[in-house]
Image: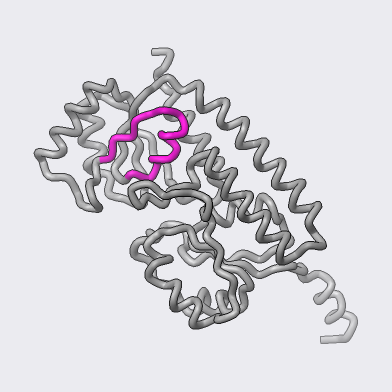
Amino acid sequence: MSVKKLIILIISLPLFALNISVTILPQKGVIKAIAKDKVKINVMVPPGNSPATYSPNFSQLKAVKNSQIYFTIGVPFDKKYLSKIKEINPSIEVVDFGKWIKKENNNPHIWLSPALLMLQAKVVLNTLIKKDSKNKDFYIKNYNEFVNSLNLLEKEGFNIRQKAFITFHPSFYYFAKDFLIKEIAIQKEGKSPSFAYLAKIIKTAKQNGVKTVIISPEFPTKYAKIVASKIGAKVAVISPLKEDPRNTIKELIKALKWMQLK
């Protein structure tokens, strides 16, 4: 390779202010919204995998070694591999993505609440400014735009009139809490339901006038489909682990607004 071509290649390469590792894809979405192309983000649990069962591969562990920051969020992966990550990279700064948030019932799905997302975004902003102060104004501008988009989602969410929905895994607990909706989870204490408990769920769904059953592709779908068929509810397929949590929240709002005019 000629010197000229080498110079062109070097110039064309993105210059990252920071290398960051996160546990799940929604964390990347929040950081990307604030940092844009200023950071390189390594996601430890790739799309289509569960944070409860996934094991990192060599390239991911290598990326962690080159990261200055690791954002945890409290899913089982963090609890299992955080000590290993610190062993690989003793100088890495570990930041709790939701350090100002009390996780209820050990439920880590805090990225699906607009109100809690604002707090998480502030954690990201403060961390970025601390590590890369020269881009402070850039980060603040993007943070404000992110918060404004969440304020709009909140306004839209409070127009939902359905007061309850069914899901298999309690992934949408904080979303439901934000908008005063009841999430009825089929899975209990991480276990599949017995026939007796399933019958109880169906009875509760009828009592609450449930019109929507939300299925997540990361979890078994047959029980949710059984409940939906028994109560005549619409089924919506929504993953809680998409990159931009705002899009997931939009999907949830749309699914729960369905049939309100029926």
Residue 192: x and y, percent?
19, 49
| Residue plotted at (58% across, 46% down) | 119
How many numbered discs? 0
| Residue plotted at (63% across, 73% down) | 68
In the visual, does 150 lie left or right of 169? right
* Nearer the observer, 151 or 233: 151
* Nearer the observer, 260 or 102: 102
Name, please, the residue furthest toward the top.
262
Residue 12: x and y, percent?
81, 69
In the visual, does 2 lie left or right of 41? right
| Residue plotted at (52% across, 77% down) | 59
Per the rendered image, the range of residues in magenta is: 170-185
In the visual, does 16 lie left or right of 5? left
Whether the magenta-drawn stretch holds residue 175 is answered as yes
Residue 62: x and y, percent?
55, 79
Q: Quadrant of the N terminus?
A: bottom right
Quarter assignment of residue 152: top right
